[in-house]
Structures are given as C-alpha cells and as structure tokens.
Image (cartoon, grey):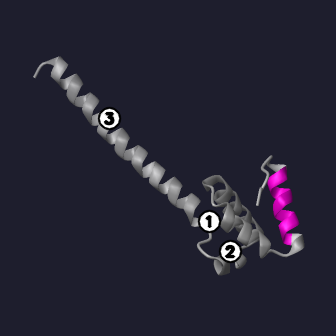
C-alpha cells in the first residue's frame, strides 16, 4: 500500500467514527430533552413548576398552541404567574 491509500482509509475511518459519535451524542441529548415533556394533562399537573415550564416552552416552540393553552388554563393563578415570571426572566413570552 502506498501512502495515498493509507491516508484515504484513515480519513474514511475518522469520518465513520465521527458520524457514529455525533449520532450517539444527538440521541442522548434529544432523549434528555424529551424526557421532561408531559404526554397528557394528568402527567402535566403532577409535575413540579420547572417541569411544567419546560413543557410549556416546548409546546410553544413546537407550535402546539392549543395543547399549551389547555395546560395553562388548568393551572392555579399563582402557579401560572410563577411560570410566566420564569419565562419573562428568560425573555420568553408564553403566548397561550
């Protein structure tokens, strides 16, 4: 084998290994993000305030306004105010 062939093989191996590592990283990060999202109203109401906030931000960012509005309408006044305050402190407006 000449030097050119060895360089090509090493380049391909690095690209394949990099692709596998990138895929695993994205899979683990996406799984961690999705883990905090409520699937139904009962699960949402059982969450702590931070979980509710993350769920509502995710629903707004993904365009599920109707579901987000339903979740917000089921919150007590102080909890809804706290979540809106958390969003405002990060520069996010929960438009439900």
In the picture shown, does residue 61 fall above or below 73? above
In the picture shown, does residue 32 fall above or below 42? above
- The residue where tag 2 is placed is 44
Task: Estimate the spatial distance between the alpha carbons at disc 2 and disc 1, rounded to whole Å.
Answer: 10 Å
Q: Which one is earlier in the sequence, the residue at label 3 or at label 1?
A: 3
- The residue where tag 3 is placed is 15
Residue 83, x across and y down, in percent: 81, 63
Residue at 77% x, 76% y is: 74
Task: Estimate the spatial distance between the alpha carbons at disc 3 and disc 1, rounded to whole Å.
Answer: 33 Å
- The residue where tag 1 is placed is 36
Residue contact at pointers 3 and 2, CB within 8 angstroms: no
Residue at 26% x, 32% y is: 12
* Image-based side of 65 in relation to 92, left or right: left
Residue 14, x across and y down, in percent: 31, 34
* Secondary structure beneath label 1: loop
Q: Which residues are magenta?
A: 79-88
Q: 21 or 35: which is nearer to us?
A: 35
């Amino acid at each position: 084998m000449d030097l050119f062939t060895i360089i090509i093989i090493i380049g391909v191996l690095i690209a394949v290994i990099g692709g596998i590592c990138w895929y695993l990283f994205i899979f683990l990060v996406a799984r961690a993000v999705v883990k905090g999202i409520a699937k139904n109203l009962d699960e949402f109401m059982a969450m702590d305030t931070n979980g509710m906030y993350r769920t509502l931000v995710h629903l707004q960012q993904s365009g599920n306004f109707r579901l987000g509005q339903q979740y917000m309408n089921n919150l007590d006044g102080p909890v809804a105010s706290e979540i809106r305050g958390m969003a405002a402190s990060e520069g996010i407006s929960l438009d439900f």
